[in-house]
Amino acid sequence: EYIYFFKLSHDIIYTILNNNIMKITKLVIITHHFWPENFLINEIALKFKKKNIQTTVVTGLPNYPKGEIFRKYQKIISIKKENFNGVDIIRIPIIPRKQGKFHQLIFNYLSYLISGFYFLRKINFNNLFDHIFVYSTSPITTALLGIYLKKKLNKKMTIWIQDLWPDSVKNTGYIKNNFLIYLISVIVKYIYKNSDNIIAQSKAFKKNISKYTNKKIKIVENSHFNIQKKKINIPNKIKYLLKKKYCITFSGNIGKAQSIKTILEASEKVIDHKDVHIMLIGGGSEIIYAK
């Protein structure tokens, strides 16, 4: 039930993808974010490539976390193909998330889908991949592009859940209408129904996902491996804090779903404890509250 990426090997990959009959040599990854944005899927893709699996990534134009399309990609209005250390990338134009407000995120999410359905039909995917792997951060609707390719080319699809929908949407407070939440849950059930393999990142995630599907769910906990073996220098100020203070660290997306205000309210309760230091590492739509 538990599979760890830091022990990734051919046997484990095939177990994850549940494809013991046919040897997988070509894989397409569907992801809302990818290099040069900083997400775990970057390392996962390189790991697949290192195991001699031809890897192609379908993603949008990079714009996270600042919400603006990276300068190199700002004039792109069609498909852009490039390569990241041996991993082929197919980029589709999208509307950036900007400040991450509700309507801006909706435009960002919808543009990914509309652009994806429009441009992917123009690409000849025959013999390009054996299996589809969806890295499902928000929005989970990203998986609909994977389902489109699955049905069009009669391939199997694995989805690795990183954000729980509709719960994540509900917790942000953006959508309070119960009918809209219900509609999102219908989409989630459809995505799970059309996924051949479902992977959760924790027991808690598995329990939640089980409310929307009766399928077997594997667990792969998020882990980090420095596949490029780059030396990372920790700033002296942080080194000092780690050495001299009792540090409580939150690292990751600083957005609505993470309820940063709750962390800040909790920090006020320990403000008189001079040896306690709370560090927030990351970026997102709620970063203004962390400053």
Image (cartoon, rainbow, N blue to C red):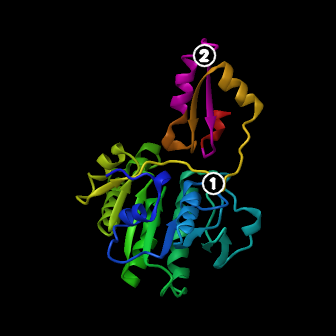
Q: Quadrant of the C terminus?
A: top right
Picture coordinates of residue 146, whole percent (x, y): 44, 72
Q: Which residue is painted at 57% across and 50% down in the image?
A: 225
> Crowdedness of circle 1 by 10 Å Cα count: few (<14), some, many (20+)?
few
Q: Amino acid at mark 2?
A: Ile
Residue numbers of the magenta segment = 261-285
Label 2: state its secondary structure: loop
The residue carrying mark 1 is 38
Picture coordinates of residue 203, whole percent (x, y): 34, 44
Residue 148 vertical position relative to residue 84 in the rendered view, above or below:
below
Count of numbered labels shown in the rendering: 2
Q: Nearer the viewer, residue 265 or 159?
A: 159
Q: CA distance from mark 2 to mark 1?
A: 32 Å
Picture coordinates of residue 88, whole percent (x, y): 61, 74
Q: Nearer the viewer, residue 20 or 202?
A: 20
Which of the 4 image quadrants contains residue 287? top right
Label 1: state its secondary structure: loop
Residue 271 shows which numbered tag?
2
Q: Amino acid at mark 1?
A: Asn
Q: Is residue 264 magenta?
A: yes
Task: Look at the numbered discs 2 and 1 and tell me whether their residues touch, using CB distance below 8 Å.
Answer: no
Q: Nearer the viewer, residue 232 or 92?
A: 232
Residue 13 visible in the displayed image: yes
Q: Which residue is painted at 39% across and 53% down in the image?
A: 3
Residue 110 visible in the displayed image: no
Find the residue positioned furthest to the top.
272
